[in-house]
Amino acid sequence: MTNKKLDLKRLMFSMASLADLGQEATSSKDLSAKMKAALYVITGMFSVPSAALFVYHPHRHELELLVAKGHRDKALQEILLPIVSEQIKRLRPNDPHTTRDLAGSTFFERNRNEFSKLQTRIFIPLFVRGEFVGAVALGRKLGGAPFRPAEKDVLRVIAHQMAITLHNARLFLALANKAAENKKLYTSMQRIYHDTIEAFAAAIDAKDEYTKDHSYRVASYAVAIARELGWKKRDLEGLYIAGLLHDIGKIIIDVKVINKGATLSAPEISEIRKHPQISYNILSKIKFPWRNIEQFVLHHHERLDGKGYPDSLKDTELSDGVKILALVDAFDAMTSDRPYRDKLPLVEAFQEVMRCQGTQFDEKITNTFFNLLSRELSGEVKEPQILPHLQNMDMGSFKALASGYTM
Amino acid sequence: MSNFSLSSRSAQNVAVIMPKGYINDMGAVSLEQASEQLLGKGMDTLIVNFSNVQYINTIGISIFTGMVERTLEHNSVLCFTNMKKAHRDVFEMMGLIRHVKVFADEEDAIKFVKRKGQHDE
């Protein structure tokens, strides 16, 4: 083959190799896999049996070995080359430096032992827009021939492309880490948010001993019913929060009035009926990440027949969320002790709910609740949501009631 | 997914490696690993049969460069057989041919190994 023909072939091969490198640089592989493939492309282009690629850590002022080829010594995998900014400034960006070029420099002399272990003949510092991002250390060529000037020209082009690949991959990695960090932060803030709301709910329920855990049970029952109705996860979260905070307005109502019961005077009734509006006023100041919380809270004492409060809304004006809260709020009140009365037996509470179907409570919602509790009782539901809150109640009678109903 | 597979067989101290498909990505690094294992088991001759190799790029050349280096370290012999002209030209241009024995086919390579064995005795 003539020299001219050989040069042409080499040029064609270099171009094909650059295309191979481009393909590896744009692949979806992770940083190490991508750079290892790129290292194979370079070592293949120049028949170099061993090479190493380093990534620069500006905070640690060192080059850390990222990938290597042809080195079987495990100790080499952990090589670190200290380098300070003054030494970086003396390097020619993306230019192949022979070990002779580097000899005498503080950087080379300090790392002479490592360069020797890596059998380095050519060291290429990788720069992107003046920023030092890493380096490639190439061993000797097979047969020991020196790198020709034309080969060094090709190495410059390759170095530039490798620097960009390394830079982009690191940027992407930094972004991915940031995104993961943000997600973690968001989860943590969400947890704090939930904890704060639960603390609020506990404060509401702690107003007197009789309403202890009422908000928590209302929230749990409401979510259990909504889940049965196929609500989405995010809407379930919102309903849970509405359940926890539905009575927040009671915080400013006299506890004596709250616990007085049936013998309330007209002004006292008027006073206690203010609590949904107060709850609404408090909660509407908060920008919740969930929809309709204030509306659920405002209308949880409305009835289908329009005899509820504060707005006397009727069936079609009430959302499922409001209907669910209205039912479970009343149900929990019936199945809890109050200072002015004992709790109702479960059967009687359900009979009362059924009696009020169509006037106070929605049929679809009450049936869903009844069926869910029946299934929880029969053991069909793996993780019961209602049953655990109804301990010390007569379940036998309820089972008999459930078997007599067809819905 | 890599379009590369590998098989090998060995008798006495001679191993025949049959790469198949495209030697153009990191999936083919198994070729380098296989040769290293065979050399580690004491094979003094590796014969690579190229008849089923479709394409070799720079990553492939790098892999063969590694194989050449290892066989030299082990004082073993690396033989290439059934090479297409295009493959041979690339190996020649890259200077790898100087370090391997090239034969038309496996049979010729085996004959050479036997002759060499007799000569060594």
Image (cartoon, rainbow, N blue to C red):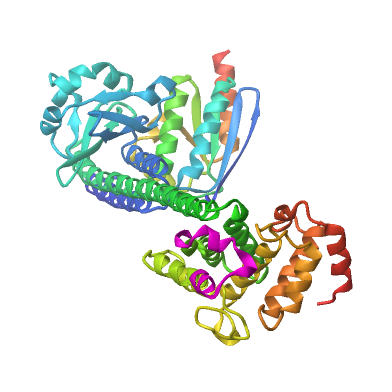
Q: Compared with residue A184, is residue B74 higher up or lower down, i.e. above or below?
A: above
User: Number of numbered discs present?
Assistant: 0
Instruction: Estimate the x, y position of residue B6 in percent, counting from the top left.
Output: 59, 41
Q: Compared with residue A308, is residue A100 higher up or lower down, i.e. above or below?
A: above
In which quadrant of the rendered view does residue B37 lie?
A: top right
In which quadrant of the rendered view does residue A378 lie?
A: bottom right
In which quadrant of the rendered view does residue A380 lie?
A: bottom right
Confirm whether residue B85 shows in the render.
Answer: no
Instruction: Estimate the x, y position of residue B9 in percent, counting from the top left.
Output: 65, 33
Confirm whether residue A32 shows in the render.
Answer: yes
Q: Is residue B20 left or right of residue A4?
A: right
* Magenta-span inclusion, residue A343: no
Magenta span dominant secondary structure: helix
* Magenta-span inclusion, residue A257: yes
Q: Is residue A45 left or right of residue A7?
A: right
Q: Which residues are magenta?
A: A251-272
Report the residue at 89% width, 72% height from top. Answer: A404
Instruction: Estimate the x, y position of residue A19 in percent, counting from the top left.
Output: 33, 53
Instruction: Estimate the x, y position of residue A70 in percent, counting from the top left.
Output: 40, 29
Q: Is residue A192 left or right of residue B19?
A: left
Report the residue at 83% width, 58% height from top. Answer: A395
Screen quadrant of the C terminus of chain B: top right
Report the residue at 58% width, 87% height from top. Answer: A316
Q: Nearer the viewer, residue A208 or A202?
A: A208
Q: Nearer the viewer, residue A150 or A327?
A: A327
